[in-house]
Image (cartoon, rainbow, N blue to C red):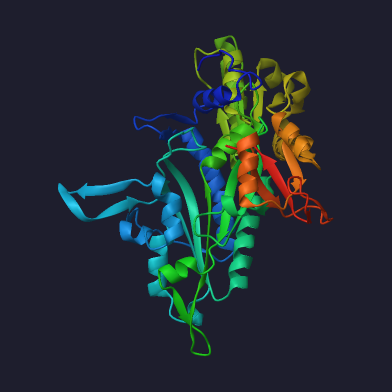
Amino acid sequence: MSEQAVTAQSQDFSRWYNEIVYRADLAAPSPVRGCVIIKPYGYEVWEAIKAGLDRRIKETGHQNAYFPLFIPESYIRREAEHVEGFSPELAVVTHAGGKELEEPLVVRPTSETVIGEAFSDWIQSYRDLPLLINQWANVVRWELRTRPFLRTAEFLWQEGHTAHATHDEAEAETIQMLDVYADCAINEAAIPVIRGEKSRLERFAGALRTYTIEGMMRDRRALQCGTSHNLGQNFAKAFDIRYLTESNVNEYCWTTSWGLTTRMVGAVVMTHGDDKGLRLPPKLAPYQVVIVPIYRKDDQRSAVMGTVERLRKLLDCAGVRVHVDNREGQSPGFKFNDWEMRGVPVRMEIGPKDVENNNAVLARRDVPGRQGKQFISQDGTLAAVETLLADIQQSLLEDARAFRDAHIMDVSSYDELRSVIDEGDWARAHWDGSDADELAVKDDTGATIRCFPFEQETEQGLCVLSGRKTERVALFAKAY
């Protein structure tokens, strides 16, 4: 890996991001336009996110299943608003096996339709409810403008689909899963997301209500990190998902869907990365500790490597993900820069003097220079490393939260809103505008309503555009 510095975030954030994704070995270009190859290092970050989320999903009573990649085109068209929302992004298979298909097949953009058809067969009475299903899969949406992890033609995700007897049960499910997403983002990825409801214009196609977790990236743009949808009875009516009540009455179910994607890998890069590369939260890092042996002479190598191997085994047996960088022909300085680029939370340095003095040097990735280094006794290595990893996880979260809060501005007029957006910050404002008003703000400022946050002041105020009294507060920002 080259030691050449990456583009500074302040100079060109978009270029910085692309350089980090490839130089930190997260991904590689694909021969198919709009797609990427997720390399092992990047995939391990995704697997850590997946593991934390899958555990939470199962703890809430959901079961994993798998549904076909190909969906009959007629299924997509049975929910009018759904097909209208996805039509520009559909990839359609018209030929297979050397023949033209009787009915075209859509490559899965999302699975509400095919799962809805299955639910209609599986659900007969109230005893079958709630039905709680989750799927880990890939999907295809033919995006015109793509960026690694953030927006690609094919991406990985989980999509949950559930059916309930009542609106209130479906609503409770929708909020519960949004909370699951927020918990995973905050406590695994150290991203202080904001929970809220999307505006009508930003809802998922065919949904009654859409909820979101929104993160602020280091360039202050918003990133939608996960969404949860109360689908009402729209899909139940389109796919005849009914149940027999205890009173022997046939009723349509109330359904939900919710999804989180490999976009979260990009969110981790853009929330925590700096001009030296990644800064990975310890809970997601493929390697939590990298040990760099330092020696100049062959007679020093044996003693140093013996100590390194002993400490590696100690950490490994305790469940710490540890890696020894024993590459020949590369200087310690090169290795330091390499692992800084890859965002490993803790670097351990072991040299001849450390062996003699029973010491080790620990350098934390989130604190640069000498300030981030500490000398420890080898006898206390495990305790020191575990304490340091926990502190780094918390420190990254607190740093991201402080950055976010410093760039959300309360505004009371449209001129203030425009000024805040022009500065690149988020504007928090009372809002009671129409869809047309929302579009006008977007056309004028480039900002959209990211959400109506759950946590907000309930005091009445005046809408920054219409001047009408309202208790509702919206967050406006430019977004990915």
Q: Name the residue furthest bottom.
A: 247
Q: Position of residue 33 (x, y in %)?
A: 37, 32
Residue 180 in the image: above or below residue 118: above
Q: Nearer the viewer, residue 374 or 139?
A: 139
- Horizontally, residue 223 falls left or right of residue 109, namely right
Residue 35 can be seen in this image? yes
Q: Position of residue 283 (x, y in %)?
A: 63, 42
Q: Position of residue 408 (x, y in %)?
A: 76, 38
Labels in figure, total: 0
Q: Nearer the viewer, residue 412 or 141?
A: 412
Image quarter of residue 88: top left
Q: Nearer the viewer, residue 475 or 402?
A: 475
Q: Position of residue 401 (x, y in %)?
A: 75, 39
Q: Name the residue furthest left.
A: 98
Image quarter of residue 385: top right
Residue in view at x 58 percent, y 68 percent: 170
Residue in view at x 60 percent, y 18 percent: 337
- Horizontally, residue 105 falls left or right of residue 474, namely left
Residue 247 in the image: above or below residue 3: below
Residue in view at x 62 percent, y 39 percent: 442
Residue 314 can be seen in this image? no
